[in-house]
Image (cartoon, rainbow, N blue to C red):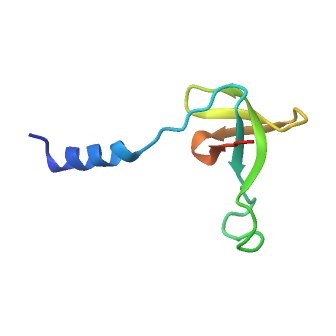
Amino acid sequence: MLSSLARMSHAFNKKVRPRSFQVGNMVLAVRRPIITSRKTGSKFTSKWDGPYVVREVYTNGAYKIVDAEGLRVGPFIGKLLKRYYS
């Protein structure tokens, strides 16, 4: 018999879909303001930048992404990326 904590954990993990990207995938990245306490733009501006291309996958869940010209944007954690469908 499972404990209540294990049951809650199982119910939550049933709905979670892991995000993993391969090298060459197109992704969108969350727009990160320099000062996070201030909102940038209006409420109708896009929260995503991109599309970017994944160039390298790190073992800790981070990804090195580059833009269309091949300029390095920086490492991003997978939580801040989503797949881009063209």
Which residue appears at 76% of the width and 67% of the height?
45
In the shown orientation, is residue 3 left or right of residue 17?
Answer: left
- Looking at the rendered image, the quarter that the C terminus falls into is top right
Farthest-out residue, left: 1
Q: Hey, which residue is sitting farthest front in the picture? A: 86
Q: Residue at x 70, y 42 (%)?
A: 85
Indicate whether 69 appears above or below 48.
above
> Is residue 81 shown above or below 25?
below
Numbered disc total? 0
**Residue 36: quarter of image:** bottom right
Residue 19: percent from left, percent from top = 54, 38
Residue 42: percent from left, percent from top: 75, 74
Quarter holding residue 44: bottom right
State the residue at coordinates (62%, 34%).
62
Q: Is residue 5 left or right of residue 37?
A: left
12 lies above or below 45: above
Q: Residue 14: image x %, image y %?
A: 34, 43
* Residue 37 sits in quarter: bottom right
Q: Which of the pair 39/16 is nearer the observer?
A: 16
